[in-house]
Amino acid sequence: MNLPPLTQRFVLHFGEMGSRWGINRTVGQIYALLYVSAKPLNADEVGEALGFSRSNVSMGLKELQSWNLVRLIHQPNDRREYFQAPDDVWAIFRTLAAERRKREIDPTLSMLRDALMEQPSVAEDIHAQARMKQMHGFIELMTDWLDDVQKMDSATLASLMKMGSQVQKLLVMKDRVKQVFTGKPTLDLPISPHTEVSVDPLLDSGAEHGSV
């Protein structure tokens, strides 16, 4: 590799992690290089920096394009193709979530929907279908959440993630209010007896940061 030490460490790490994310080592290293690069790179520059053959670089770039993780850039008076990774990490998160849903989650949902439409005739299949129904409900709940995430801009998504424990406080307060009126708690969230629960945790969040 022909890279500065810190950049090389980052690139090598992404190569190792690539297999855990469903991509090979070469693709992981190409993506990492493009992400930290200060300018778009062409295939020759990528190959020289990483020590990869032109064919491996070409295949890696095509795979990254299929994942929507790199953009094709055209430079004035230059016929070569240049590539750049988005610098918005939240956009990267949304892209990875959408692509993994399309490749992994949607086929599972389709199989579960088909299975739930069947009429099992033996006890083992009746039990299995009941478990499949639970899994189907959970996956649909998660995909609905992912759909909502896809609609958020990066600033909104970052704010949501920073809320952290404020979300738990809101759920606890909702449960306590419902218990007052119905006598039936709906949540069983762990909370310290010394924890202060505000009626509006969003106001608490603003107060902690000095806002009005």
Image: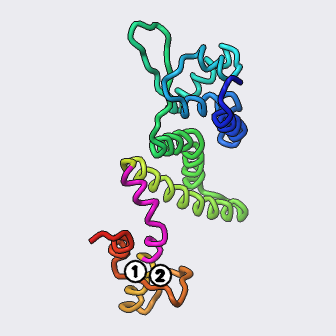
Residue 20: image tag:
none
Label 1 with label 2: CB-CB less than 8 Å: yes
Look at mark 2 in the image and give the residue it sits on.
Answer: 186
**210 vs 124: above or below:** below
Residue at (49, 18) in percent of width and height? 82
Residue at (38, 92) in percent of width and height? 180
Residue extending furthest toward the front? 4
Magenta range is 155-169
The number of callouts visible is: 2
Q: Is residue 170 left or right of residue 53?
A: left
Helix, strand or loop at label 1? It is: helix
Q: Upstream in the sequence, badge 1 or badge 2?
A: 1
Residue 85 in picture, x, y percent from top left: 50, 31
Q: Point out the image quarter for the N terminus.
A: top right
Residue 166 colored in magenta in the image: yes
Residue at (66, 63) in percent of width and height? 126
Look at mark 1 in the image and give the residue it sits on.
Answer: 174
Give the image quarter of residue 202. Answer: bottom left
Residue 74 in picture, x, y percent from top left: 42, 16
Q: How is the image coloured?
A: rainbow
59 or 126: nearer the viewer? 59
Determine the CA span between mark 1 and mark 2: 9 Å
Three-letter amino acid code of the residue under disc 1? Lys
Q: Which is in the foreground here, disc 1 or disc 2?
A: 1
Residue 197 in picture, x, y percent from top left: 42, 83
Give the image quarter of residue 16. Answer: top right
Residue 13 colored in magenta in the image: no
Three-letter amino acid code of the residue under disc 2? Thr
Q: Dot 2, crowdedness within 10 Å: few (<14), some or many (≥20)?
A: some
Q: Point out the image quarter for the C terminus.
A: bottom left
38 or 100: nearer the viewer? 38
Q: State the predominant SS element of the stretch in magenta.
A: helix
